[in-house]
Image (spheres, coloured by chain):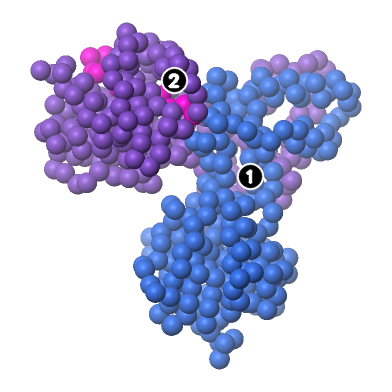
Chain colours: A purple, B blue
Amino acid sequence: MRVLITAGGTSEKIDDVRSITNHSSGRLGCLIAEEFLKNHATVDFVTTAQAKHPAENKKLQLYEIEGTQGLADQLQELLQKTTYDAVIHSMAVSDFTPAQTFSQEDFLASINHLFQEKKVPLTKEDLTQLTDRTEVDEKKISSDTEQLYLVLKKTPKVIQLIKKIQPETLLVGFKLLVDVSKQTLITTAQAGIGKNQADYILANDLAKIKDNQHIGYLIDKNGQIIGEKQTKESIAQLIFQTIDRHNT
Amino acid sequence: MRVLITAGGTSEKIDDVRSITNHSSGRLGCLIAEEFLKNHATVDFVTTAQAKHPAENKKLQLYEIEGTQGLADQLQELLQKTTYDAVIHSMAVSDFTPAQTFSQEDFLASINHLFQEKKVPLTKEDLTQLTDRTEVDEKKISSDTEQLYLVLKKTPKVIQLIKKIQPETLLVGFKLLVDVSKQTLITTAQAGIGKNQADYILANDLAKIKDNQHIGYLIDKNGQIIGEKQTKESIAQLIFQTIDRHNT
């Protein structure tokens, strides 16, 4: 069996010294990798420099990325080269990336100019145009302003690449919410299945992740909860067993 | 001799899963700590979970912080409790912290509303008022919008706390710029001396920091360059020797 696992969290550059970072220790991803390795699978593991890395292993190959674009490029390369039985995409991927940074002065001038030009309520297109005008090209943003306006644009949905390139692979997606009801968590995760062509989604809530506890629900493509676990170790085992069942 | 050293880079929370992080490996700060420890000083070391930590030592005490406010609180506590011969403030501190996040829809509505109310070119005060209206209280910002508008406000200047509490301590500040001329770097660092009541500033340029190279200029309170070094190790030694000279 050969699997591709992503873990850790992406960082999107604001300038040469600052990034927006999605926090993820990468610990669950490591445990999943170790579970597959223990069961003689070959693992390609995509992670970040900051995240925890699995112990070295002859059947483990590591790939490090930083931002969402780097992740998309790396996955594309791997998925075009190698056929995977499953892709377990546990990395916390940034939904937004910096498009433009304005000092308070520049932002005010741009907005006032836009109003003079348009003389009507502004539309979304006006705003998008304003912030698309130039690309981020800052070495280090000057701190000589009272406020900074950071405009972020959506990143492409990396998870949706996976089945486009390998429709036959089994895809396990992850959905993390923060302090919601179990019902909201499950419903949100279910909604992600069709959109991302996932075969399974592991739904979890940051408020229920602490110390040795990590509550996770594994949902299949029919939206059924097929497992509920309380620790990272048992989530890792459940994911391995679920994928392994398809291969036997 | 007893010194307080800060190292690493602060992270400012956007929500429970995202932060703006100032990158700093903390390696130079570690070398500075080790140089003082080798010379029998006692070191209080303020850093972050992500940064490199110095090797354990009986005369070394570690304190971990995350954001600028946490750093200010920690320094205040230490400076009120202990008298230091010197404070070496190498931590990369965020100049801005998230004040408010808007979806594109909410931002557009707020801006249009402001224009209807004011019917004149907007002023800085209008913008500040708009973004001060509510505090950031997001658990996880929804990704259901094309753009996010993140408004950042200035953080208090932590370095200026130090001499306010301990006017007698020797303060070594750090100035990092990115890819500027030596002249600009030195002039900018000199300007920081009076403002922050620093006794010395170590000026460095990210573009001149790679592999084993780390070019740094140590500037004294008269604005004179009293040393120019090429590696982290020699910068650490220069800082120790400079402080030590005051104590003998």
Q: Position of residue B224 (x, y in %)?
A: 65, 77
**Whether residue B173 is situated above or below residue B101 in the rendered picture:** below
Start-end of magenta stretch: A166-178
Residues beneath discs 2 and 1 located on the same chain: no
Q: Which residue is mark 1?
A: B97
Residue B95 can be seen, yes or no: yes
Question: In the depicted view, which residue is nearer to us: B88 or A12?
Answer: B88
Mark 2–mark 1 Cα distance, whole angstroms, equals: 32 Å
Q: Quadrant of residue B149?
A: top right
Q: The residue tagged with tag 2: helix, strand or loop?
A: helix
- Is A28 left, or right, of B89 in this rendering? left
In the drawing, what numbered circle is on residue B235?
A: none
Q: Position of residue B152 (x, y in %)?
A: 66, 41
CA neighbours of label 1 inside 10 A, class few (<14), some (14 to 19), many (20+): many
- Is B39 left, or right, of B142 in this rendering? left
Q: Main secondary structure of the magenta part?
A: strand
Q: Residue drawn at (44%, 53%), measured in percent from left and top?
A: B49
Q: Residue drawn at (57%, 45%), measured in percent from left and top?
A: B12
Q: Which residue is mark 2?
A: A182
Q: Residue drawn at (64%, 77%), measured in percent from left and top?
A: B169
Inspect the image, locate mark 2, and give the three-letter code of the amino acid beneath it.
Lys
Q: Quadrant of residue B194?
A: bottom right
Question: In the depicted view, which residue is nearer to us: A168 or B57?
Answer: B57
